[in-house]
Image: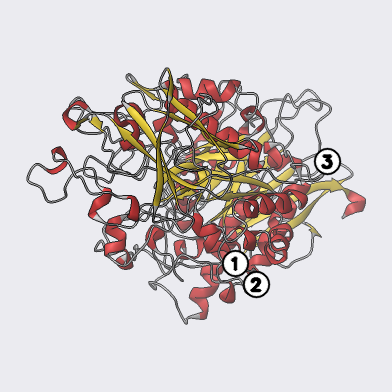
């Protein structure tokens, strides 16, 4: 485009920069701006070659069509309007802005004082007005054609009861794997080596930590660190440049296609509750400069922000155009990248209204009626830090939810905490008290032992205290209560007995996870005892601490994890949608759930109240009310012993049936064998028996 070419009117929809084969339509939302400009940049980025005022305004959407502008063109936005922080407005046309709908960015902001709308260090702070041009320090948006030749590959579309989630950081998963090239990005995820590991492990879905464009916080850069996890979004349509190379977004599409071909779904961890622009003293990078009062929830004094997220700001999801942006973003990932599901960071924030959290909030209603998004898995992180922010079990169907009570209950039981057996029983049967309402299935509970936020499984069994000194916050950050155990030695040990006890604890915890009702989620690396050296908040550790240590992988634990996953897949009793409540079944008159003591007697209320009880066993069947067309099997008997050795008496099998022991965490390589008489346990263990025809034994 030349300087003498005038823009055409264009269209108010869709928003963003959209190439039509001849030129590009630009459409930008701003309710309070007085003008919006598109700034074009030279191919190498630093030189602003033209500034075009968008000529039309339809409602609050400014738009114009620029003939001849093709994919690859670099651009940014500038907005004119009032600079009145005390009224909630922070327009500053000297600041180049990222288009909220940009599909690709050239990089990340460079931390210079010019990227702030006010003059840092000024005695009036953010009430001052800075006139330096920020363009040289800002990434540029790239006009992009997102079309991709998908071929005949179809999405797996697995039902939730067959889902096994694998939470992974894209770079951390692939950076040190010897056969995943090039390291650290989508092409590594698509490599034969990673596909082989995931398929042999048996997981059905990869849940990626944030891959939306995000910033490296200034305070981290100043300490020589970086934002590793990615929970500081600055663009909800753009993949972060650090995960792409020459072919751009096609690399991510290729990775999804390869995973789909292998039968593996792809979920994204998405951060729509806040942005990386921080509080009133933060930079002006995008939303703040385009329309601060519309994009953010402002406090009673509109100079400041509501901070239900702990990051300095909260997106104003109740504004219809902010809601539209989030919904457009979600649909974009599904339609353009064929993403199968989403995990919503601090999802309680997305359900907040002026009256507090509301399971009938507009965002949830919009999700549940959208014809594109109703095909996806929806997983909530069911809390934020605002008032009444803990909302486990309160989300509407079809949401599933991260269950931190499962995590803590399982850790406490295996640590040997007094009175922990009743809670373990509730967790392995799907956390019905939280989720059995409103027609929600047992799969609503996403069961986790660990996640990116906290200790790894190896560290849960090796450290009593967090060791986050490398984060530069004097070890004050991260969870304080981890329900962990170091077996008498903090960190690595040369004692064979300590290491054997730790290995057994890991097997016991993993067995509990994969034998529980609900949807299991495995943290990448836990399958082979990956450690972070006791760091339970590795958000800034883009290094060997945060990356998986493939060279030190525990092959024996990996083999046992594969066996657990295969066992879960083979037994529908372990992955039911209906809850087990010891209700009588029509087919045989038997309850669907029995609880047994180690001596073979049924548990009584007094038994459950014993503070020192560290044994419980569940005999499970297909739930009462299970339809005739569902997969069926007779019964499984699951024993969990966190105490001393004991003798376990199984229920007498019906005539022509026998109990076959398929899993024994103390003998991880043992072949299935018929159980004759009582079972002798020498100490902590998990055992899984299947009721089978006698000839099978």
- Residue 289's disc is none
Q: Which residue is mark 1?
A: 528
Q: Earlier in the sequence, mark 3 or mark 1?
A: 1
Residue 405: % across, % down: 46, 42
Is 143 positioned to the left or the right of 272 in the image? right
User: Between residues 96 and 418, which one lies in front from this camera angle?
Assistant: 96
Q: Which residue is mark 2?
A: 555
Image quarter in which the C terminus is found: bottom right
User: Between residues 228 and 645, which one lies in front from this camera angle?
Assistant: 228
**Residue at the far right in the pictured view:** 695
Kindly tell me whether residue 430 is visible in this rendering: no
Whole-Å distance between the Cαs marked 1 and 2?
A: 6 Å
- Residue 654's disc is 3
Which residue corresponds to the image point at 46% horizontal and 27% vertical from the top-left?
Answer: 63
347 vs 483: above or below: above
**Residue at the far front in the pictured view:** 4
User: Between residues 512 and 659, which one lies in front from this camera angle?
Assistant: 512
Q: Quadrant of residue 33?
A: top left
**Foreground: disc 3 or disc 1:** 1
Q: Residues within 10 Å of mark 2 (few under 14, many from 20)?
A: few
CB within 8 Å, label 1 to label 2: yes
């Amino acid at each position: 485009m030349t300087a003498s070419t005038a823009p055409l009117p264009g269209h108010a929809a869709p928003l963003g920069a959209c190439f039509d084969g001849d030129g590009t339509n630009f459409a930008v939302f701003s309710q309070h701006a007085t003008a919006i400009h598109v700034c074009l940049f030279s191919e190498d980025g630093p030189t602003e070659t033209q500034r075009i005022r968008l000529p039309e305004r339809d409602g609050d959407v400014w738009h114009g069509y620029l003939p001849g502008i093709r994919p690859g063109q670099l651009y940014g936005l500038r907005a004119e309007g009032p600079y009145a922080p005390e009224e909630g407005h922070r327009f500053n046309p000297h600041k180049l802005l990222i288009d909220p709908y940009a599909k690709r960015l050239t990089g990340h902001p460079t931390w210079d004082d010019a990227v702030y709308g006010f003059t840092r260090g000024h005695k009036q702070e953010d009430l001052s007005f800075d006139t330096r041009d920020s363009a040289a320090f800002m990434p540029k948006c790239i006009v992009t054609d997102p079309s991709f030749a998908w071929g005949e590959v179809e999405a797996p579309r697995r039902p939730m009861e067959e889902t096994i989630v694998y939470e992974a950081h894209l770079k951390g998963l692939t950076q040190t794997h010897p056969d995943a090239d090039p390291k650290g990005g989508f092409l590594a995820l698509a490599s034969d080596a990673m596909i082989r590991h995931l398929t042999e492990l048996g997981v059905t879905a990869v849940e990626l930590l944030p891959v939306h464009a995000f910033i490296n916080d200034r305070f981290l850069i100043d300490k020589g660190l970086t934002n590793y996890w990615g929970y500081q979004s600055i663009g909800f349509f753009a993949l972060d440049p650090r995960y792409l190379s020459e072919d751009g977004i096609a690399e991510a599409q290729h990775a999804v296609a390869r995973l789909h071909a292998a039968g593996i779904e792809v979920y994204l961890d998405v951060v729509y509750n806040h942005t990386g622009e921080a509080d009133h003293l933060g930079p002006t990078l995008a939303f703040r400069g385009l329309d601060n009062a519309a994009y953010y929830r402002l406090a009673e004094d509109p100079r400041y922000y509501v901070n239900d997220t702990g990051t300095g700001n909260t997106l104003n999801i109740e504004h219809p155009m902010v809601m539209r942006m989030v919904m457009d973003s979600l649909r974009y990932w599904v339609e353009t990248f064929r993403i199968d599901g989403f995990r919503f960071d601090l999802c309680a924030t997305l359900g907040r209204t002026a009256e507090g959290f509301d399971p009938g909030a507009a965002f949830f209603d919009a999700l549940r009626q959208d014809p594109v998004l109703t095909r996806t898995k929806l997983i909530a992180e069911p809390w934020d830090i605002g008032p009444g922010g803990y909302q486990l079990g309160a989300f509407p169907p079809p949401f599933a939810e991260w269950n931190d009570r499962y995590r803590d209950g399982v850790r406490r039981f295996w640590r040997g905490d007094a009175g922990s057996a009743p809670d373990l029983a509730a967790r392995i049967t799907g956390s019905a008290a939280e989720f059995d309402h409103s027609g929600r299935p047992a799969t609503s509970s996403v069961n986790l032992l660990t996640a990116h936020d906290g200790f790894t499984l190896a560290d849960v069994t090796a450290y009593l205290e967090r060791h986050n000194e490398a984060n530069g916050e004097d070890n004050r950050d991260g969870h304080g209560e981890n329900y962990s155990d170091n077996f008498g030695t903090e960190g690595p040990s040369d004692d064979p007995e300590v290491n054997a006890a730790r290995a057994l604890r890991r097997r016991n915890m993993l067995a509990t996870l994969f034998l529980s009702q609900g949807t299991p989620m495995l943290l990448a690396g836990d399958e082979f005892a990956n450690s972070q050296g006791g760091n339970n908040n590795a958000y800034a550790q883009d290094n060997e601490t945060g990356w998986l240590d493939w060279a030190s992988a525990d092959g024996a634990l990996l083999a046992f994890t594969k066996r657990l996953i295969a066992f879960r897949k083979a037994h529908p009793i372990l992955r039911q949608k209906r809850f087990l409540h010891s209700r009588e079944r029509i087919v045989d008159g038997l309850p669907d759930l029995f609880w047994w003591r180690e001596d073979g007697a049924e548990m009584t209320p007094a038994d459950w109240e014993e503070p020192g009880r560290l044994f419980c066993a569940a005999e499970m069947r297909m739930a009462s009310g299970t339809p005739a067309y569902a997969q069926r099997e007779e019964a499984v008997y699951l024993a969990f012993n966190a105490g001393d050795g004991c003798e376990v008496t199984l229920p007498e099998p019906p005539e022509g049936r026998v109990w076959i022991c398929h899993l024994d965490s103390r003998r991880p390589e043992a072949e299935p064998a018929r159980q004759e008489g009582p079972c002798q346990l020498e100490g902590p263990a998990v055992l899984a028996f299947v009721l089978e025809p006698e000839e099978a034994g």
